[in-house]
């Protein structure tokens, strides 16, 4: 069952598809598994940024070349206000900050190699522990971040 959230001038579809959880927009798709994250869309670059002096945590930024557009028509349940819900084994927090933007925070089930993923209009942030290695693979139009 797909759940749709209001996004820019359309909707993002969230469903328990692919390898765990899939988020689809008008110009991009994000697939979250336990040990890898797949992305297909307007990719600009990848950057790893330590979050503390001891290197215990870091954020991997996946920068988009163009803003993440919404789909034209929703087909299922539509969420328009900030709320928390579950899709399969993933937790989802949808946050609307008036005048600032909309954000999806995706919480994986136990055993995942990342803590959470935040999706913004032109940036995807993957929060993980500092010693985690991140590899980028490209295949068939998909970019896959492999976490080890």
Image (cartoon, grey):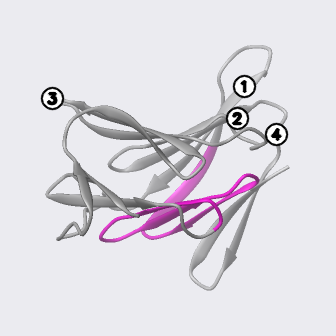
Q: Which residue is mark 2?
A: 128
Q: Is the residue under label 1 in contact with that under label 2 (CB below 8 Å)?
A: yes
The numbered mark, 2 or 1, whose residue comes first in the sequence reads 1
* Mark linked to residue 103: none
Residue 143: give x, y in percent of width and height: 62, 69
Q: Secondary structure at mark 2?
A: strand
Mark 3 lies on residue: 98
Ranked by sequence position, the earlier of labels 3 and 2 is 3
The secondary structure that dominates the magenta segment is strand
Marker disc for residue 57: 1
Q: Nearer the viewer, mark 3 or mark 4?
A: 3
The disc, 1 or 4, on the residue closer to the chain's N-terminal end is: 1
- Give residue 82's quadrant in the image: top left
Q: How far apart, in angstroms, are the residues tagged by discs 1 and 4?
A: 9 Å
Mark 4, residue position:
132
Label 4 environment density (alpha carbons within 10 Å; few <14, some 14–19, many ≥20): some
Compared to 113, does 52 lie above or below? above
Picture layout, residue 117 above or below residue 122:
above
Do labels 3 and 4 touch, CB within 8 Å?
no
Q: Residues within 10 Å of mark 3 (few under 14, many from 20)?
A: few
Q: Is residue 33 left or right of residue 85?
A: right
Q: Which residues are magenta?
A: 19-47
Query: In the picture shown, does residue 108 fall above or below 147?
Result: above
Q: CA distance from mark 3 to mark 2?
A: 28 Å
Q: Residue at x 27, y 64 (%)?
A: 76
- Name the element at disc 1: strand
Q: Please tell me which residue is depicted at 34% across the width and 71% down the height of the picture.
A: 27
Quarter occupied by residue 133? top right
Give SS at disc 3: loop
Query: Do residues under tags 3 and 2 come within 8 Å of each other at their CB atoms?
Result: no
Please state if 22 lies on the left or on the right of 70 as rendered: right
């Amino acid at each position: 069952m797909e759940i749709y959230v209001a996004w820019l001038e359309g909707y993002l579809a969230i469903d328990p598809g692919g390898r765990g959880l899939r988020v689809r927009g008008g110009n991009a798709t994000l697939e979250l598994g336990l040990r890898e994250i797949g992305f297909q869309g307007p990719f600009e670059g990848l950057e790893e940024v330590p979050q503390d002096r001891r290197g215990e945590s870091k954020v991997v930024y996946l920068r988009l070349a163009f803003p993440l557009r919404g789909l034209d028509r929703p087909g299922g349940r539509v969420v328009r206000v900030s709320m928390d819900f579950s899709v399969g084994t993933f937790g989802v927090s949808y946050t609307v900050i008036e005048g600032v933007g909309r954000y999806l925070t995706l919480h994986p089930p136990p055993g995942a190699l990342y803590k959470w993923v935040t999706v913004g209009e032109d940036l995807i942030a993957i929060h993980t522990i500092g010693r985690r290695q991140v590899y980028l693979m490209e295949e068939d139009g998909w970019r896959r971040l492999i976490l080890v």
